[in-house]
Amino acid sequence: MRQDDILRSIFDYANRANPYPLLAELRKKPVSWQADGPDDAGTYVVSTYREIVALLHDPRISSDLRNCVQTGRRIPSDRYRFISLDPSEHDRLRRLAMRHFGPPERPDYVERLRPEIEHIATTLVDELRNEHRIDVVARLAYPLPVAVICAILGVPLEDQPQFHVWADALVESSAYTPQEGRARREEATLALNEYMARLVARRRTQPGDDMLSRMATDTGPEGRMEDPYLVATAALLLVAGHETTVNLIANGVLTLLRHPAILERLRHEPELIVGTVEELLRYEPPVQLLSNRTTLEEIQVAGTTLPKGVLVTLAIAAGNRDPVRFRDPDRFDPERRDNAHLGFGNGIHYCFGAPLARVEAQIALTEFVRRLSRPRLVVDPPPYRPSPVLRGPQQLLIEVDGVQSACSAERN
């Protein structure tokens, strides 16, 4: 295979179940031009850990694709989403959102959500009693983070079927042709923004204690986020707040079922769950590629010149298995030391919801391990979602001998 065709093969659905041999091939050349890329424009792919981390901290790398002038055309970017912006506007908008979610103003917010998340997870597993064939995605990995993010934002849970369609269109757009993907993305973005605009207006006149109400009525020292940014931020948090965690939980169950000795250890050593989730974020990261970067000026990376205004893709999943950084990188090891993975990115765009995703995955996987008796895979590999960027099982069928009650599992 030619070096510049590897990304095309990674995008090929036939390789979705195991892209890691291709990512290892990609890593043989730290920076390579790939013919495929966002909008079929071609992209420079950076695939080694050290170079990825350096670029995530490099102010010459932009997240605003309006700065991309590759092939003489501008590639549109959502100018109201803070993840698509650069400092200082990015920093201001992120601060305005973060003040209602975490440090420094609400440092214990996520931890205070733990009892509610545990209750949701327990209830979802309770509903599996008397069932012996279960789709883990549909019954646990998806409904848990959706219920949590709806509660956090103040989005009615009964609207979930409506925004599920839009979220799917946004997440899976990279799996379609450039024209189809762009059309689906634009249509879904418009519909979701219109929905969130109506919800913002409602929360402003009838506020609650949810995050959307707080942002809509903010009287903090920096003022309130302007409505176009508020609507785009709310839509972003709704989609990102559950889509990546669905993959993290589903990938986690799949990985544990493929490593039964580790699953059994977790039954007796529940404290191992913290390291297990961190290792999952390295070993099977829910976000595999960051394809929304461009260069603000010419940059030298590992002996390769990246011209000004070109697309850059950071292959997170390749960097997470870089043998220069991680010993025995293809081994799943929950006790791995110094696990500075890239599962949540790095630098100023480090994942906003990382603390929440960690807690959700820890709780969901703990509940799965302690209450489902002798779980085993029905199909391996399972069918995967179309997207090569946000990679995870679309369905994860398992069989179990039974589901213990929460009280019985506690005694055992």
Image: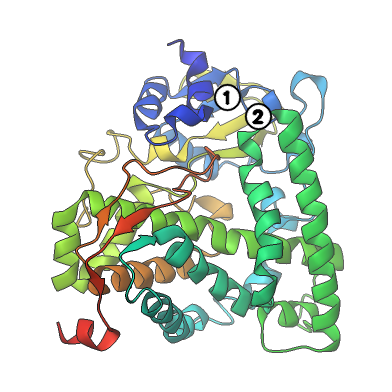
Residue type at mark 2 is Leu
- Expressed as whole percent of the image width and height from the top left, the position of residue 116 reads 47, 84
| Residue at image coords 62%, 74% | 150
Viewer-side residue, 13 vs 326: 13
- Expressed as whole percent of the image width and height from the top left, the position of residue 84 reads 70, 49
Q: How is the image coloured?
A: rainbow
Q: Kindly tell me whether residue 86 is visible in this rendering.
A: no
Position of residue 374 in the picture relative to residue 56 (left or right): left
Q: Kindly tell me whether residue 178 is visible in this rendering.
A: yes
Q: Is residue 321 above or below residue 104?
A: above
Displayed quadrant of residue 242: bottom right
Q: Is residue 309 above or below residue 164?
A: above
**In contact (CB < 8 Å): disc 2 and disc 1:** yes
Question: The residue tagged with tag 1: helix, strand or loop?
Answer: strand
Residue type at mark 1 is Tyr
Real-space CA distance between mark 2 and mark 1, rounded to the nearest whole angstrom: 6 Å
The outermost residue toward the top is 2
Q: Is residue 232 above or below residue 255?
A: below
| Residue at image coords 66%, 34% | 294
Q: Which circle's residue, 2 or 1, is located before the other in the chain?
A: 1
Question: The residue tagged with tag 2: helix, strand or loop?
Answer: strand
Displayed quadrant of residue 60: top right
**Label 2, residues with CA under 10 Å away: few <14, some 14-19, many ≥20:** many
- Residue under pointer 1: 44
- Label placed on residue 311: 2
- Label placed on residue 11: none
**Label 1, residues with CA under 10 Å away: few <14, some 14-19, many ≥20:** many
Position of residue 228 in the picture relative to residue 99 (left or right): right
Viewer-side residue, 280 vs 381: 381
